[in-house]
Amino acid sequence: MKIKNYIFTLTALLGLYCPATMQEVNAQELKTLTLEDLNFGGTNYHNMVAKNRWTTWWGDKLVRQDAEECFLVDLKTGKETKLFNITQLRKIKGVEGVHSLYQTSFPDASKTVVKIGDQLINWKKGTVEKDNTPKAYVRDYQLFVKDAKGEHKLTTDGSRNIVYGQSVHRDEFGISGGIYWNPQHTLLAFYRMDQSMVSDYPLVDIPELDWNPTAGESRVAKFAPEKYPMAGETSHKVTVGVYDVKTGKTVYLKAGDPTDRYFTNIAWDAEGKTIYMFELNRDQNDCRLVSYNAATGDKIAELYRETDAKYVEPQHPIMFLPWDSSKFILQSQKDGYNHIYLFSKDGKELKQITKGKWVVMDILGFNNKKQSIIIASNELSAIQRNLFSVDVNTGKRTLVDDNGKGWHNGSLSESGQYIYDNYQTPTVPRKIAIINTENNKHTAYFTADNPWKGYTVPTYECGTIKAADGVTDLYYRMVKPLNFDEKKKYPTIVYVYGGPHAHNVDARWNWGSRSWETWMAENGYLLFILDNRGSENRGKEFEQATFRHLGDVEMQDQMEGVKFLKSLPYVDANRMGVHGWSFGGFMTTNLMTTYPDVFKVGVAGGPVIDWKWYEVMYGERYMDTPQTNPEGYAGSSLLPKAKNLKGKLQIIIGLNDPVVVPQHAFSFLKACIGAGTQPDFFVYPGEPHNMRGHQSTHLHKRISQYFFDYLK
């Protein structure tokens, strides 16, 4: 399970100095932002984010969804006409439980049918139609399929130990679910995970505050164990089953012994008869694409193999060309950057479609008529995300997004002719355009107002410095206090994440600044955020620089950021703090104890303290096992550094954290007790790795107050 950067990331534009736009109102008239405005758990947060439009594709038609109405959007003008409203649907005989139209979908481009939950409603005919498409789901640990004949129970031994139809391998390798229908919905592939051999980590649920002794409820905390395979220990075993709707029979893929192996990125061919799956060894340096006969479970062939001296990380299933089912595309960073390769169905590599010192960040889909792939990439800038059409036959790339700047998220219509492009730039909170990929014409559809208009805002800047290797460019963001005066010296906080599969600096609105940074800048602090080597979207060498020694290279780069800060006349080097969560909590604690004379105050949230207590898949990819890399594990452990703590350090965790288990924080506290050092500690009972709801606002008030108290 990936350690995730738990709050919104901040962004920057390539190598430029970028001050925020000044408000055109008198400063005395501006309102002050609060945490209730800025934090996603705040009471006024919903009014302080850029307005959006909810839409979905109906074939090649675009529908806007509102709570009570749905509108058809003219793709050439952006104008809307009403399709139906919620009252109309509720009046149709047989319709039940329609509370909102935000979650509507349109499963058939040729029909006036909308799907809401399990109901197919024809708004033109005023009828409810039967949905005979088979559906799979898990209930009480068992896997079921419901079709026209009724409900079928596929399993009987499901439990905490035997898990069916759900995400496996702790959500690594691009896995986010466990049910995979073939295109015809006649065969269902699903995961079965046996974790009976995995150790239970002893999490505990405490009773609610309204415990009632007269209701017969127990006052004793309940054991709530988490199956947690730590690095170097016994892991679970995964197999893949295939259920045949017609025969009611299930076979399992004959993939051999699942011990210490990972099965991921399951895909079907267009005919729905063959399954493709990446198989990765536990050491994660040998990856193979294998095909299987779905009817028998027999192995057909090994189609592709990729090895690496450090690790291979499959993240995406193969995709067959919709106009030629004898060919598929595969993503790999074997040349140093994530790119697209074309293969024949028998596994012959035909060519590399994209190439360059940039990464393909996503594949939106295909344009069948143009025989092109629509991708998102950072070709134009390492901190941008732009949309391109790539000709499969020639490899020619054409920029298709609205402006070639910013951060673009697109969704593709059924044929691939149109893109719904929802994007931000450092000065634009949100714009939406409709793009015709065949002629590259753009239709302006929506522009959001600045939700912070009329409020005080700090200054946002961005740029680059060199990494500790003296060669590599690293991108940073700086948030300067209100009424910034370069003749003053400001207390400065380094916000850090630093780990893989995340970044903080990109070209979104206000450089994507996290709400908390804005709040601290409004209170007189300068914020600095740097993406060190090891973070994402910069290529394999950049990402793998931290291999087997997590924390070393990352801290070296962060200290280059500190060196840069000390060179600035307005940074008070005697009042420097650091804050981060998860991997950032590890980095915060590491920086506080490795450079105790640099950082005066730190707040470490959900910190990893020793990687031997972290999970198998993530931990062993970057560190190998404690048995094979004892020096690396010893060098990255923060326990021996507890004695170095000089400044004020607060550690915060969720008591029920199933990602970075509480053992990390508790063990560090114990080490500090033994060393005679004095960290502070706060825990959120019942909360997981990240605080939910309004507790997030409470959390950020606590973090802020710690800096207010000790980094004045």
Image (spheres, helix red, strand yellow):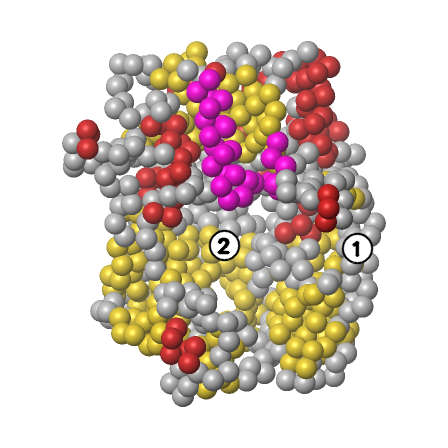
Residue 653 seen in the current view: yes
Identify the mark at residue 161; answer none if there is no mark. 1
Check the image and name the residue furthest to the front.
214
Instruction: Name the residue: 75% across, 33% down.
Output: 626
Query: Is 237 left or right of 546, judged from the image as shown?
Result: right
- Between 269 and 305, the one lying in front of the other is 269
Which quadrant would residue 89 be assigned to in this image? bottom left
Instruction: Name the residue: 32% across, 71% down.
Output: 71
Q: Which residues are magenta?
A: 683-709
For label 2, the crowd category at 10 Å Cα-Cα, with few meaning under 14, some 14 to 19 and many 20 or more, is many
Q: Amino acid at mark 1?
A: Asn
Secondary structure beneath dot 2 equals strand
Spatial distance from mark 1 to mark 2, Cα to Cα? 38 Å
Instruction: Name the residue: 42% across, 73% down.
Output: 414
Instruction: Name the residue: 37% across, 53% down.
Output: 408
- Point out the frontmost of discs 1 and 2: 1
Check the image and name the residue furthest to the bottom.
125
- Between 705 and 261, the one lying in front of the other is 705
Which quadrant would residue 570 be assigned to in this image? top left
Residue 465 seen in the current view: no
> Does residue 348 sit above or below 464 in this rendering?
below
Instruction: Identify the image quadrant of the C terminus.
Output: top left
x, y percent for residue 259: 80, 53
x, y percent for residue 596: 55, 14
x, y percent for residue 10: 40, 38
Q: Does the magenta segment cover residue 585?
A: no
Secondary structure beneath dot 1 equals loop
x, y percent for residue 477: 38, 32
Residue behind mark 2: 339
